Image (cartoon, helix red, strand yellow):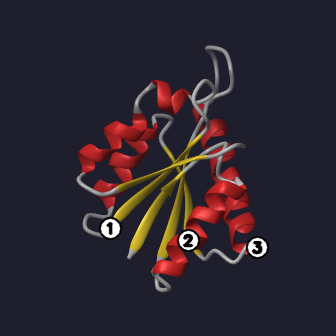
């Protein structure tokens, strides 16, 4: 199976790595694509190209960190600022490629994605959603 892993501040989390290793133990042929939504800096003004460049760098750093822990990441990429739009765009660009979504969020109280109900809304894409609560 191919899994779309969506994470930002949690992409380097040991909890996420442990969950991906569990998936690999159950499905040794599993493949992972890491999608890191771009997150603008605090404030109202930012340059979109710089935000995307930072997200790409974060995605590559997280890929290296996960691979160092024995988790094969086929591809790492940056996505839209909105995690739901990033998911939608990736799934639309690669229809039928993914069999499940692994969504890593911060814990309740810290997670903006949980406040936005991303973990529940991601189910609208028709794929199983594996929600991982992790620390950055």
Residue 96: image quadrant is: bottom left
* Residue at left offset 55%, top offset 71%: 22
* Residue at left offset 23%, top offset 53%: 126
* Residue at left offset 29%, top offset 46%: 123
Measure the alpha-carbon separation of dots 2 and 3.
16 Å
Return the residue nearer the eye: 124 or 48: 124
Label 2 sits on a secondary structure element that is helix
* Residue at left offset 75%, top offset 64%: 65
Residue 120: image quadrant is: top left
Q: Which residue is mark 1?
A: 99
Residue 72 seen: yes
Measure the alpha-carbon separation of dots 3 and 1.
25 Å
Return the residue nearer the eye: 45 or 125: 125
Residue 68 - label = 3
* Front: mark 2 or 1: 2
Q: What residue occupies the far top of the structure in this picture?
A: 44
Label 1 sits on a secondary structure element that is loop
């Amino acid at each position: 199976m191919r899994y779309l892993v969506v994470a930002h501040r949690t992409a380097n989390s040991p909890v996420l790595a442990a969950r991906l290793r569990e998936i690999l133990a159950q499905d040794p042929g599993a493949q992972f694509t890491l999608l890191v939504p771009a997150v603008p800096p605090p404030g109202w003004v930012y340059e979109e190209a710089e935000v995307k460049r930072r997200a790409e760098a974060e995605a590559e750093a997280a890929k290296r960190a996960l691979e160092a822990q024995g988790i094969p990441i086929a591809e790492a990429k940056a996505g839209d600022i909105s995690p739901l739009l990033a998911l939608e765009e990736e799934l639309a660009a690669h229809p039928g490629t993914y069999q499940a979504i692994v969504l890593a969020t911060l814990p309740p109280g810290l997670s903006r994605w949980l406040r936005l109900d991303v973990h529940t809304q991601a189910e609208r894409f028709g794929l199983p959603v594996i929600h991982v609560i992790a620390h950055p």
